[in-house]
Image (spheres, helix red, strand yellow):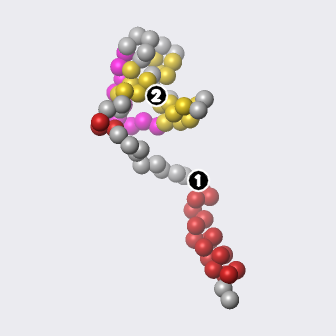
Amino acid sequence: MKFICEICGNELNLYKVKFVSENNKLICKKAVCCNKYMTQVKSGEYEGFPDIKRNDSALNTGDKLWNDFKHNNVE
């Protein structure tokens, strides 16, 4: 993924990026230049959303929820 500094024009290429939400914007913590976050250069290579990996333990309770539902709603 390519990033460019809006102040000095420096370019940065990163293979793996991790976006985080800050001030209602998605930013890459590794893309910093001139003490500001760099702007992502969008290209056809990176269209769409990447795979999102979630590590929230609450998401793994699907089987328990389904089993509880079946147990409570069986006639």
Q: Residue at x 56, y 35 (%)?
A: 21
Count of numbered circles on the image:
2
Badge 2 density bin: few <14, some 14–19, many ≥20, Cα 10 Å: some
Task: Name the amino acid, label 2.
Answer: Lys
Residue 46: x and y in percent read 34, 38
Badge 1 density bin: few <14, some 14–19, many ≥20, Cα 10 Å: few
Q: Quadrant of residue 41?
A: top left
Looking at the image, is 29 positioned above or below residue 49?
above
Residue 8: x and y in percent read 41, 10
Residue identifier under label 1: 56
Q: Residue at x 50, y 30 (%)?
A: 27
Q: Quadrant of residue 3?
A: top left
SS of the residue under disc 2: loop
Q: Are marks 1 and 2 in contact (CB under 8 Å)?
A: no
SS of the residue under disc 1: loop
* Of the image marks 1 and 2, the number of the one nearer the N terminus: 2
Magenta includes 23?
no
Q: Choose between 73 and 61: the one closer to the eye.
A: 73
Residue identifier under label 2: 30
Q: Is residue 43 left or right of residue 75?
A: left
Magenta-colored span? 10-18
Q: Is residue 65 left or right of residue 39?
A: right
- Quadrant (top left/top right/bottom left/bottom right) for the C terminus: bottom right
Task: Name the amino acid, label 1.
Answer: Asp
Q: Quadrant of residue 23?
A: top right
Q: Residue at x 35, y 40 (%)?
A: 47
Magenta includes 17?
yes
